[in-house]
Amino acid sequence: MTARTRAAAILLAPFFLLFTAVMVLPIGYAVWLSFFTEKQSGLGFGGAESVFTGLGNYRAALGDPAFREGFLVLIGYCLLYIPLLLAGALALALLLDSALARARRFFQLALFLPHAVPGIIAALIWVYLYTPQLSPVVQAMEAGGIGFDFFSPEGALPSVVNIALWEWLGYNMVIFYAALQAIDRSVLEAATVDGAGSWRVALSIKVPLIKASLAMVGLFTVIGSLQLFTEPLILNKGTGSAVTSTWTPNMYAYTAAFDRNDYGLAAAASVLLALTAALLSFAVTRLTGRRKGGRTA
């Protein structure tokens, strides 16, 4: 082993140790746990014992309508949330990058601040704003003749999407704005000299040049959307909301583990969700890679 190889191994060792401790071992334990279930011995007077069940927990999760409906909720959430997030963050970034923008740093900070609020606190704030007896927003809507129940079956999904947008719109706007600032200004000046207007420059020059950032944000947003948990959990607690304890797959796993003490079922549901996230991540990566390859060709 050369001195350079030893130095690289020493420098990389802390990362791999930490990665193994916080990622590999927990995932391995979850997979192992998903093959077992707890059963009472005898007539139920003895202690519970761990019994190997093979793929039984996976069959139980996939056979449970509540678990399958959670994925339908995630599909609706992704279809509503991801386009709004990407379009909104990109539009705000383009506005801040335009020559007409004023007080850029102030608006960057103002739009980014909601992301600094912890997710639980953000959800609690919006639960207050959604509650008819407390919210000045609901009272103003009712005074204007607009009636909307944020906790109803029709309103629950938009309510959760709104909270997530409030938390993450500014964060992703900063990513897009940083990518826009990295564009060579001479390219934009050349387009302006050629007679391109602001809209043409934005849509035909700026957006294509930051597609790598768009793909990255899209990938992370898909992964984050599949982990939807905090916002609906808060809406589920004491609000009379249509959000149930198994509304999303993550909530299903949480309920199985801590309400029903069925850790094997919770582990199986978590593994299935992780596999779904991995497959979607692979699909998004391949899709963006093909588009890049097609443009290069």
Image (tube, grey):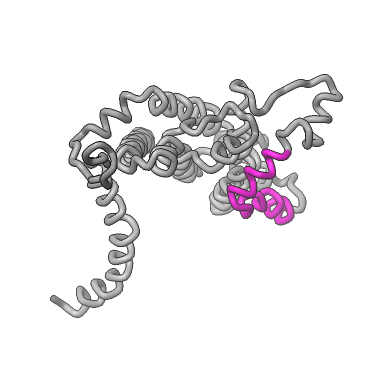
Using the image as rendered, state which of residue 195 and residue 97 is in the foreground: 97
> Does 87 sit left or right of 68 as displayed?
right
Residue 253 visible somewhere in the drawing: yes
Which residue is at a point 43% across and 24% down the rendered structure image? 69
Picture quarter with the C terminus: top left
Residue 32: x and y in percent read 23, 47
Rendering quarter of residue 21: bottom left
Using the image as rendered, state which of residue 52 and residue 288 is in the foreground: 52
Which residue is at a point 28% across and 64% down the rendered structure image? 16
Q: Is residue 211 magenta?
A: no
Residue 172: x and y in percent read 56, 46
Residue 226: x and y in percent read 44, 37
- Up-down: is 119 above or below 233? below
> Is the stretch drawn in magenta largely helix, strand or loop?
helix
> Does 231 sit left or right of 8 as displayed?
right
Picture quarter with the N terminus: bottom left
Question: What residue range appears in magenta?
Answer: 104-128
* Residue positioned most to the right: 143
Which residue is at a point 86% across and 25% down the rendered structure image? 143
Residue 253: x and y in percent read 40, 39
- Up-down: is 30 above or below 195? below
Residue 286 visible somewhere in the drawing: no
Rendering quarter of residue 281: top left
Rendering quarter of residue 163: top right
Using the image as rendered, state which of residue 210 and residue 257 is in the foreground: 257
Q: Is residue 111 magenta?
A: yes
Please give the count of numbered marks on the rendered protein: 0
* Residue positioned most to the bottom: 3
